[in-house]
Image (tube, rainbow, N blue to C red):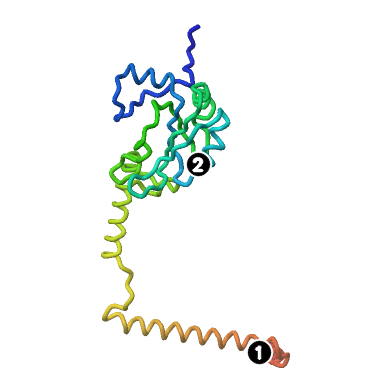
Amino acid sequence: MASIVQSLSVPSTYKDQQYQGTSSQLALDLANSTTLYVGNLSFFTTEEQIYELFSKCGEIKRIIMGLDRNQKTPCGFCFVEYYHNADALDCMKYINSSKLDERIVRSDLDHGYREGRQFGRGRSGGQVRDEYRLEFDAGRGGWGHVRAKQEAERERDQKANYEAITTIPEGANLDYKDRKDESSKRSRDDDEDEEEQQRSKANPRFREGDEEEEDA
């Protein structure tokens, strides 16, 4: 029976550029696949967290964490291998687009993990998506690599051309001194007035004298 709603277990149209087979071979591999590609992970998400979530759909054979090619640190993706194709399909239905470590993760059927696919393919060693990302993402290393370089150049330029003034320019010393002296004088006058008021409140004789002067 035909359905107007697409099945949640259907793989995406993405094709790995390093896949050597034909389109029909890829379709066959995906139909029998027990492997999932999981993306949009935080760099700080651990293998234990991934296992806890994805094991809800079936027994996991292994998890391969995606690594930065240069630094060998997590770079936001992984491969999850199940023992059975049905478990991988269930994961597509029930876990894809769910939240892990405060991020919406994406899972897709994969044709199968091979050694070397765990490394990022971006120029900087991470994923290609992080090369040109313009927004700041604390969970994925901050700025994208291109934007990070631009921000570093902007900070260097700002430091070179907009340093804070730490010395008083020549010719401004006299004016600054006069304003400082005037401010000190006002402060002393205010202190004396306050002192006089407090003394009047503390000694009744001062208050009586003031009242007599007002009556006169």
Quadrant in the rendering for residue 21? top left
For the residues labelled 1 and 2, the Cα–Cα distance comes to 74 Å
* Residue neighbourhood size for the residue with mark 1, other residues' Cα within 10 Å, grouped as few (<14), some (14–19), many (≥20): few
**Residue at coordinates 35% horizontally, 46% vertically from top-left?**
144
Q: Is there a contact, CB below 8 Å, between mark 1 and mark 2?
A: no
Q: Which mark is residue 47?
A: 2
Amino acid type, mark 2:
Glu
Side of 71 where 106 appears, left or right: right
* Residue, far top: 1
At numbered mark 1, what does the secondary structure look like: helix, strand or loop? helix
When the figure is inspected, residue 205 is found, relative to residue 112, above or below; the finding is below
Amino acid type, mark 1:
Arg
* Residue neighbourhood size for the residue with mark 2, other residues' Cα within 10 Å, grouped as few (<14), some (14–19), many (≥20): few
Side of 198 where 146 appears, left or right: left
Q: Which residue is mark 1?
A: 199
**Residue at coordinates 48% horizontally, 21% vertically from top-left?**
9
**Residue at coordinates 41% horizontally, 27% vertically from top-left?**
110
Instruction: Please state, as top left, top right, bottom left or bottom right, where the C terminus lies in the image.
Output: bottom right
Viewer-proximal residue among 28 and 135:
28
Q: Position of residue 125 (x, y in %)?
A: 32, 45
